[in-house]
Amino acid sequence: MAASALLVTLPVFLQAPWVRLSPASAAVFTAVLVAMGVVLANSADQQHQRLGSLLVGFAGSWLAGSLFWGWARLHPLWHLPIEAFALPLALAGLGGRWRLGCGFYLGSLLGTAATDAAIAATGLMPLWPQALAAAPAEAGRILHLAGLQVLQPIGLMVVLGFACLLLLLSRWLWQQGEVGRVASSALSTTLAVDGIFLLAALVAPRLSGLI
């Protein structure tokens, strides 16, 4: 569960600046993740097998993130479709040996979908391409304005509503066995990262602009 939570944070704090510098190398790194995952999954140690499955699921999220943030980041409507490219494989693999990786991928995807839906519902979607096309300082200013807009009564109600729904869903998933706990960890960590990002946009906009 801790590994699942940790892997959710890597795209924000490691992949984001990497993709800014070299999206192609970030995308190619997917092969390294898959190779590591396959090797660990074929180990005799059960903990290594679980970690290997998680890495393979994480590789799917990593590749999708590299593709979108590297080449399509100014087109927010493409975000979810690109992130969901492995959805059929993940659903089909829930009952197989890669089920933990599939659970991680699905939990992360659900968190991404909820985040995008909240951005759209609060009217912030037009600011997305503006922030990503701007220099870091200007991007931070735009994101700071977006954070202030979230704190308006309607925006705050929308965000709190999404947060409550995700917490309830995370609690339900936690009760569904090991795969559910992996998905729950990914989903709840996504919610926590979103909260940190909102806080950064409000109190440290230059940092949020770099991310």
Image: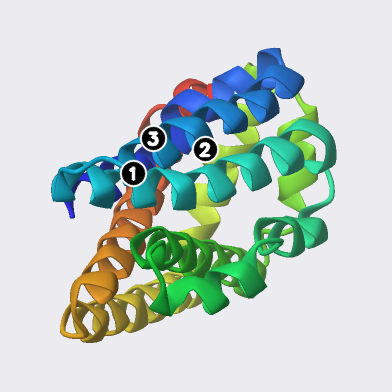
**Residue 124 visible somewhere in the drawing:** yes
Residue identified by numbered label 2: 34
> Label 2 amino acid?
Val
Residue identified by numbered label 3: 39
Look at the numbered disc 1 and give the secondary structure of its residue. Answer: loop
> Label 1 amino acid?
Asn
Q: Nearer the viewer, residue 16 or 96?
A: 96
Residue identified by numbered label 1: 42
**First reached walking from the N terminus: tag 1 or tag 2:** 2
Q: Quadrant of residue 149?
A: bottom right
Residue depth check, mark 2 versus mark 3: number of the one nearer the observer: 3
In this figure, what is the number of numbered marks? Answer: 3
Q: Nearer the viewer, residue 153 or 29?
A: 29
Please state if 61 lies on the left or on the right of 123 as rendered. left
Q: Nearer the viewer, residue 115 or 130?
A: 115
Q: Residue at x 33, y 59 (%)?
A: 186
Q: Residue at x 31, y 83 (%)?
A: 169
Q: Are marks 3 and 1 in contact (CB under 8 Å)?
A: yes
Q: Residue at x 56, y 41 (%)?
A: 62
Residue depth check, mark 1 versus mark 2: number of the one nearer the observer: 1
Q: Residue at x 18, y 79 (%)?
A: 177
Give residue 137's mark: none
Q: Nearer the viewer, residue 115 or 176?
A: 176
Q: Is residue 196 above or below residue 154?
A: above
Q: Quadrant of residue 145?
A: top right
Q: Residue 103's x, y, as percent? A: 39, 67
Q: Residue 88's x, y, as percent? A: 65, 74
Q: Are marks 1 and 2 in contact (CB under 8 Å)?
A: no
Q: CA distance from mark 2 to mark 3?
A: 9 Å
Q: Residue 54's x, y, as percent? A: 36, 50
Q: Is residue 95 above or below residue 39?
A: below
